[in-house]
Image (cartoon, rainbow, N blue to C red):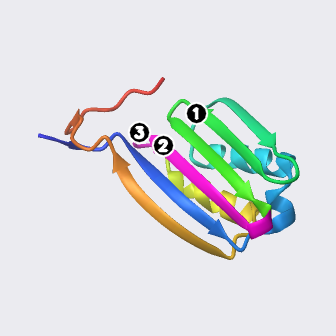
Amino acid sequence: MRGVGLGRHVIAELLDCDRAALDDAKLVEDALLEAAKATKSKVISHYVYRFKPHGVSGYVLVAESHLSIHTWPEYGYAAVDVFTCGERTDPWSGLKVLKERLKARRVSVISMERGVGVAEEGETPTTA
């Protein structure tokens, strides 16, 4: 039976965040790396870019998938993806770090299992 998911994808809206934090590229970079570590993922690479006049986008590529963020400081808003594969990783731990570091007062989340039906029951998905 093919019913095992390959990974968990958490898509979050972080609302009423600290506006200064959302516009601080170093803080966002550090938060993304801390979040990746919290998921128990292996970091491969990362990049963060600060837009003018404001806003930050960044990603962390992990062996188990990725974390990404796009911020709109003028609205106190960040769009976040935390996608991890394998049974030992936990995307929710990464989201918790980002919520705390950006001081989000409200969070809206969609969570989904990715790759359901691709792997056989008992089969362990491989990572890069």
Question: Helix, strand, or loop for circle 1?
Answer: strand
Q: Is residue 85 magenta?
A: yes
Image quarter hosting the N terminus: top left
Q: Nearer the viewer, residue 111 or 126?
A: 111
Classify residue 124 by image quadrant. Answer: top left
- Residue 22, percent from left and from top: 79, 59
- Quick check: marks 2 and 1 in contact, CB under 8 Å? yes
Q: CA distance from mark 2 to mark 1?
A: 8 Å
Classify residue 68 by image quadrant. Answer: top right
Q: Is residue 42 above or below residue 128?
A: below
Classify residue 37 by image quadrant. Answer: top right
User: In the image, which disc is placed on residue 62?
Assistant: 1
* Mark 1 surroundings: few (<14), some (14-19) or many (≥20) residues within 10 A: many
Q: Is residue 83 magenta?
A: yes
- Residue 88, percent from left and from top: 45, 43
Q: Please state if 43 lies on the left or on the right of 124 as rendered.
A: right
What residue lies at 76% left-to-right and 39% top-to-bottom? 48
- Quick check: marks 3 and 2 in contact, CB under 8 Å? yes
* Mark 2 surroundings: few (<14), some (14-19) or many (≥20) residues within 10 A: many
Q: Please state if 46 lies on the left or on the right of 119 as rendered.
A: right
Question: Helix, strand, or loop for circle 3?
Answer: loop
Give the mark nearer the N terminus: 3 vs 1: 1
Name the residue beneath numbered marker 2. Answer: 84
Q: Is residue 47 above or below residue 95?
A: above
Q: Is residue 39 above or below residue 105?
A: above
What residue lies at 59% left-to-right and 58% top-to-bottom? 95
Number of marks in picture: 3
The boundaries of the magenta stretch are: 74-88
- Residue 36, percent from left and from top: 63, 44
Question: Helix, strand, or loop for circle 2?
Answer: strand
Q: Nearer the viewer, residue 73 or 39?
A: 73
Q: CA distance from mark 3 to mark 1?
A: 12 Å
